[in-house]
Amino acid sequence: MTSQIPDTFLYQGEKYELVALDGERLITPQDYGMKPQMLHTACYRGFYSTYEITNDGLFLTEMVIGEVEEGHKSIQGIMPKLPSQNSHGYPTYKGLRLITPFAGRIRLGKDFIQELYVHMGYQKPTAYETLLEFAFEVGKLVSMQDISDENSKNRGAFKKMF
């Protein structure tokens, strides 16, 4: 399996990758009656998303979705922008501001350590220099904790096993 494209989260002007989720799921195309097909080997689920975390909550701001049985449908009154004929892009829903009623915890990483890259599934939390843990209740941010120091103690353990 190829390394998969993770969802992206924007927090305080910084870009992070989703590395762990514990709780009710995030928004998917299936929530809007769409069944995405695999984009390519780096995106078996057929879509990836961008979210923004603010004091007001967790918002879906963009979603890239490949081929969909029965065509793409509106999300929040927005249809996807289609790539030009000379582009290798995919239909993208831009300009969304959809509150996400997620309840649970997520871990977000940034500053990926290339030497710890694993060519299967999603990258492990220990492969990131910075790791933040967020807790949400029905889309509202309850807490944020920087767990980078704790995370560094296990750095590289997964890759060493293989």
Image (cartoon, helix red, strand yellow):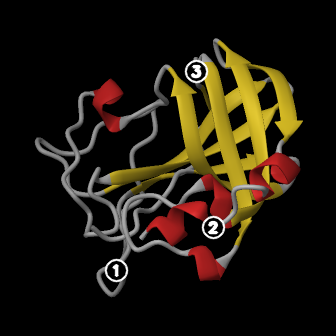
Q: Which residue is mark 3?
A: 102
For the residues labelled 2 and 1, the Cα–Cα distance comes to 34 Å
Is 85 located above or below residue 63 in the figure? below
The residue depicted at 54 percent of the width and 75 percent of the height is: 117
Compared across the picture, whether 143 is left or right of 41 comes to: right
Pick the front one: 15 or 60: 15
> Going from the N terminus, do you reach mark 2 or mark 1 first?
1
Q: Nearer the viewer, mark 3 or mark 2?
A: 2
Kind of residue at disc 2: Gly
The quarter of the rendered structure image containing the N terminus is bottom left
Q: Which residue is mark 2?
A: 156
Q: Which residue is mark 1?
A: 88
Identify the secondary structure beneath mark 3: loop
Kind of residue at disc 1: His
> Going from the N terminus, do you reach mark 3 or mark 1 first?
1
Residue, far bottom: 86
Task: Kindly indicate the quadrant of the structure image that contains residue 14.
Answer: bottom right
Kind of residue at disc 3: Phe
Q: Residues within 10 Å of mark 2 (few under 14, many from 20)?
A: some
Pick the front one: 45 or 50: 45
Task: Kindly indicate the quadrant of the structure image that contains residue 77.
Answer: top left
Pick the front one: 86 or 42: 42
Identify the secondary structure beneath mark 2: loop
Q: Give percent across and percent down for residue 46.
A: 29, 53
What's the mark number on residue 138? none
Q: Nearer the viewer, mark 3 or mark 1?
A: 3
The residue depicted at 25 percent of the width and 69 percent of the height is: 40
Q: How many discs appear?
A: 3
Compared across the picture, whether 77 is left or right of 120 comes to: right
Is 41 located above or below residue 48 in the figure? below
